[in-house]
Image (cartoon, rainbow, N blue to C red):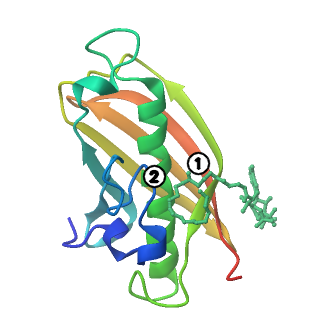
Amino acid sequence: MSKQAFQDSYPAEFSHCYGCGHDNPHGLQLKSYWLDEEDRTHTVAHFTPKPYHTGGVPDKAYGGLIASLLDCHGTASAAAAAYFKEGRKMGTAPILRFVTASLSIDFLRPTPIKEELTLYGEITQLEGRKATVALSLSANGEPCATATMIAVALKPE
Ligand SMILES: CCCCCCCCCCCCCCCC(=O)SCCNC(=O)CCNC(=O)[C@H](O)C(C)(C)COP(=O)(O)OP(=O)(O)OC[C@H]1O[C@@H](n2cnc3c(N)ncnc32)[C@H](O)[C@@H]1OP(=O)(O)O
């Protein structure tokens, strides 16, 4: 894993996101990294739910939590890949920030809330302002959800 999380390179004005902003004390504060320093296409993040992240069944996670985690890991992965493609260190100006244009999720099995969850991302396409990211969330090595995200870089203005 890289030493600095992608989200920790976001400037202050972009650090209040519910899913990953380090300046949002009520948020999930997700942190994403390159899976392997030698490979700039795969990313990883970990998250351990709290008991209050439950859905209808006490020991299973709320689907919206899963969507939030995939959402933030995907946009962070897209930003990291775009910086890498430009040969720049993350967080350097001009700021590259991606938002979710589309997020399609398949919920494969109930997600436990008592175990650490692992999120993986793979940048499958990065053209112009648009990135496609294949995402998954697993618990105990078992995939619980998979997703495809289209993330779009905000225009400089
Ligand atoms: C909270 C918001 C604050 C924002 C400011 C601060 C940002 C700080 C970031 C912090 C990191 C955390 C972020 C967490 C992740 C979220 O939760 S983000 C919040 C949820 N998402 C949104 O609110 C986005 C709302 N949508 C939009 O703003 C606009 O529709 C978009 C996505 C920016 C695209 O609009 P646009 O800039 O006019 O771009 P456009 O030319 O239409 O499309 C560009 C390309 O994307 C493609 N595309 C656009 N939409 C789609 C789609 N739905 N499906 C497939 N392809 C699409 C187009 O076809 C085009 O492709 P090419 O022709 O280049 O091949």
Q: Residue 90 in the image: x percent, y percent?
A: 40, 81
Label 2 residue near ligand 1, CB within 8 Å: yes
Side (left or right) of 57 relative to 151? left
- Left or right, residue 140 beside residue 93: left
Q: Is residue 82 above or below residue 122?
A: below
For label 1, the SS is strand
Q: Residues within 10 Å of mark 1 (few under 14, many from 20)?
A: many
Q: Which residue is mark 2?
A: 72
The percent position of residue 108, horizontal first and vertical second, equals: 45, 20
Given the image, on which type of amino acid does mark 2 rest? Cys
Residue 16 found in image quarter: bottom left
What's the residue type where badge 1 is placed?
Met
Query: Looking at the image, which residue is at 37% across and 36% down?
Result: 137
Q: Alpha-carbon distance for marks 1 and 2?
A: 10 Å
Q: Find numbered disc 2 in the image and state the secondary structure of the residue it sits on.
A: helix
Query: Label 1, on which residue?
Result: 149
Among the 4 quarters of the image, the one containing residue 54: top left
Residue drawn at point x = 34 percent, y = 47 percent: 26
Decide: is 123 above or below 104.
Answer: below
Give the number of the disc on residue 131. Answer: none
Q: Whole-percent x and y of residue 131?
A: 61, 62
- Label 2 CA crowd tier, 10 Å (few <14, some 14–19, many 20+): many
Residue 18: x and y in percent read 43, 50
**Residue at 50% across, 91% down:** 93
Q: Do tag 1 and tag 2 residues touch (Cβ < 8 Å)?
A: no
Q: Is residue 59 above or below residue 144?
A: above
- In primary-sequence order, the first of circles 1 and 2 is 2
